[in-house]
Structure formats: C-alpha cells, structure tokens
C-alpha cells in the first residue's frame, strides 16, 4: 500500500508505483478526497481515470453524497455460477453460443415480451418514485438483457475442468437515466453547497446533502437500481443455464441439479454501513466488497483467466478489492492503435 499525498485525507493506494497511474486519475482522486464530506479513500490496483470520479476508488462519505462517485451504471457487477458439468463433455460450443445470443438481448435491444418470472423479479425491486410509465415499460422489458460496452457472458472452466458461467452487466438504461437525472439535480443545487462550505466545487462532483428531499430521492433510486441490476443478472443467468442444460442433456431439468456454487456481486454501488463505529456511506466505483470470507469475482480480459476471490476483511481498504478493469489505454486510444484484425488475432 502507498499513500497519495496532496489531499486533506490520506489516499491509500494498492499500486506498485504511483508513477504508473495516469496523472489525470491522480488529480481526480485528490479532487474527490478534498470534498468536505469525504472522510476516507482507498484505491484499487486497477485504478484509472473515469467520468466524474475515478474507476477503482472506494470513497467513505458522511453528510452528503456525490452521484458521480458511483457513476451512471448503478449496480453494475458480476455473476458467476459453478456447475457440475465437465468442459470436455460440451461438444458444440458454437451452437451453445448462438442459443445464448437468442435468449439474451444485447446492446440497446430489449425483450419483445416479459415472462411471469421476469415480471416477478421486476416487481421485487419495489416502487420507484416519479418513474414515468414509458421509462417503467422499457426497464421491465430490459430486465434479462446484457447491454453493451464491456458487458459480457462467458463460458469458462476451473482447474478441475468443471464449467463456470460468468456474466457482467448492470442496471441497463434506467440506471443511466436516473443517475444523470440526480446529477443534474445536484448541479442545480451547487450554489447551496458553495454557501454552506464557503468554497467552489467541481461541477461533476456536485453533491446532495444528507436528509434533504433530493438526497432521500437519490438514495431510494440508487437502492432500486441496485436491486434491479442484481435481478437482471439473475434473470440472464437463468436463461443461459437453461440453454446449457438443454445443450448438455436435451431436456429442461432443474438448474439446482447441476449448480454447485453461485456468486453475485456489485462493483459500482453505494453501501450504507458503519466505518470506525459510526454510520457512513461507502461508495465503490470499480471495486468489490471483500469482507472476511466473502466471495467476489475479478474477471480477466478477453481470453485471460478470471478469478473467484475470498475477502480478507482489510480495514485499510474498507473491506474492498479490485474488480478487474485494469487497462493500459483508454477505449478511444485502443480504437486508434489496434485494428480489428489485430484484435481477432490476439483472441
């Protein structure tokens, strides 16, 4: 662990060399740490510059919350299922892939209709204040869809040859829209923060003060989105496991007959907890909860190994670990420097 200087609180960083971290990311970390309501920060090994706030940061706050610190894909995370199926027993992986592509909408696509199960999962998220009907309909139809960007579904196997199914997704379009709505609200109240603290603030880090109606509405929506994201992964996993079952045995036997272990964890989210014996918010933007014995997922890049990890309960990191998004360049830079042919050859 290293300490990044230049802020009002120590920024604890799990990196080998501070010089290897983008200067923009270091500046962004200091800006966040200098906010009056921020009382602690930890930074993961896969840290990099992000929109509004740094990816790979764990931020402890009291008295206020900045919507940009959790980001727009509220509840984004991973789910992995260990099965009792041996990898060498799967004969036609291309056919299995095509069945998954039919079962799970990708990109901006959504489900043409809903099912009793997906409706029940949607309803279990609870009420969402001032959610307009068109937005609610789209969110209902997107439950069980993957999205775009770096979201993925992957078939892999462990050291003993047993199949794992792993997927990465979040709260889809509704999480993005709600996050941006609340950020705009916070930016509209920026003058109140300036008057309260007697200093200026970065517009991207505008915050909502604890106890205000705007804060209460944001926290309610955040918790809804986190439940939605969790359930979205559950619905997708049900579908891909059903396809895997049919591919392996030619029937729809219960999933419990061949599922050994399940892990489902967020890595973009807010947690209400105690820090140093006092209530606080812990925001993880690109970090996973890693309490002692708690299971988490750190995916590798395409074609590389992924890891199921067990938390050590490190208090310095606020019980957190990395989420597997390390990089050597931005997506835009990669598009400029790496051709599609090179990428295909690499994978």
Image (cartoon, rainbow, N blue to C red):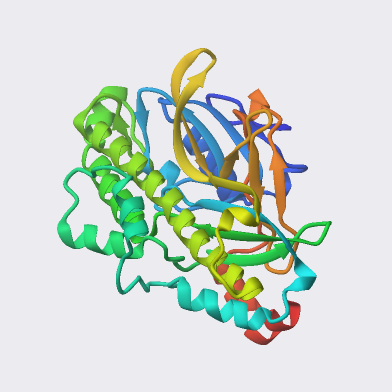
Which percent across, then down, holds residue 273?
47, 24
Quadrant of the drawing holding the C terminus: bottom right
- The single residue placed furthest to the top in the displayed view is 277
Q: Quadrant of residue 331?
A: bottom right
Which percent across, then down, holds residue 24?
56, 50
- The single residue placed furthest to the bottom in the displayed view is 341
Q: Is residue 333 left or right of residue 239?
A: right
* Residue 259 makes an appearance in the image: yes
Q: Residue at x 38, y 50 (%)?
A: 228
Q: Residue at x 45, y 49 (%)?
A: 230
Q: Is residue 215 left or right of residue 31?
A: left
Q: Nearer the viewer, residue 84 or 101?
A: 84
Q: Is residue 121 left or right of residue 158?
A: left
Above-or-below relation of 201 to 112: above
* Residue 150 makes an appearance in the image: no
Q: Is residue 59 left or right of residue 157?
A: left
Q: Residue at x 35, y 64 (%)?
A: 142
Above-or-below relation of 238 to 57: below
Q: Nearer the viewer, residue 144 or 276?
A: 144
Above-or-below relation of 147 to 275: below
Q: Quadrant of residue 89?
A: bottom right
Which percent across, then down, holds residue 307?
72, 51
Quadrant of the drawing holding the N terminus: top right
Q: How many marks?
A: 0
Above-or-below relation of 92 to 86: below
């Amino acid at each position: 662990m290293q300490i990044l200087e230049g802020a009002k609180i120590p920024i604890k960083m799990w990196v080998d060399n501070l010089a290897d971290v983008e200067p923009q990311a270091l500046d962004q970390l200091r800006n966040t740490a200098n906010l009056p309501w921020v009382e602690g920060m930890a930074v993961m090994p896969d840290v990099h510059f992000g929109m509004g706030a740094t990816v790979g940061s764990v931020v402890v706050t009291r008295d206020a919350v900045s919507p940009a610190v959790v980001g727009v894909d509220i509840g984004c995370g991973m789910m992995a299922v260990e099965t009792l199926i041996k990898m060498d027993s799967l004969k036609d992986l291309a056919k299995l892939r095509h069945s998954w592509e039919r079962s799970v909408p990708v990109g901006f696509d959504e489900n043409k209709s809903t099912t009793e199960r997906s409706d029940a999962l949607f309803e279990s998220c609870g009420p969402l204040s001032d959610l307009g009907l068109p937005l609610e309909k789209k969110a209902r139809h997107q439950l069980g869809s993957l999205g775009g960007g770096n979201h993925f579904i992957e078939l892999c196997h462990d050291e003993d040859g047993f199949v794992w199914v792993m997927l990465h997704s979040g709260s889809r379009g509704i999480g993005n829209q709600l996050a941006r709505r609340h950020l705009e609200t916070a930016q509209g109240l920026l003058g109140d923060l300036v008057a309260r603290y007697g200093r200026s603030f970065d517009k991207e880090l505008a915050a909502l003060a604890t106890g205000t109606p705007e804060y209460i509405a944001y926290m309610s929506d955040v918790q809804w989105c986190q439940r939605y994201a969790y359930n979205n992964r559950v619905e997708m996993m049900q579908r891909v496991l059903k396809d895997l079952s049919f591919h392996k045995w030619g029937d729809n036997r219960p999933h419990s007959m061949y599922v050994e272990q399940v892990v489902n964890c967020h890595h973009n989210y807010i947690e209400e907890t105690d820090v140093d014996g006092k209530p606080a918010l812990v925001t993880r933007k690109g970090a996973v909860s890693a309490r002692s014995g708690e299971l988490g997922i750190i995916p590798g890049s395409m074609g590389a190994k992924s890891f199921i990890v067990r938390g050590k309960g490190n208090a310095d990191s606020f019980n957190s670990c990395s989420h597997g998004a390390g990089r050597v360049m931005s997506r835009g830079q990669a598009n400029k420097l790496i051709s599609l042919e090179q990428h295909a050859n690499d994978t």
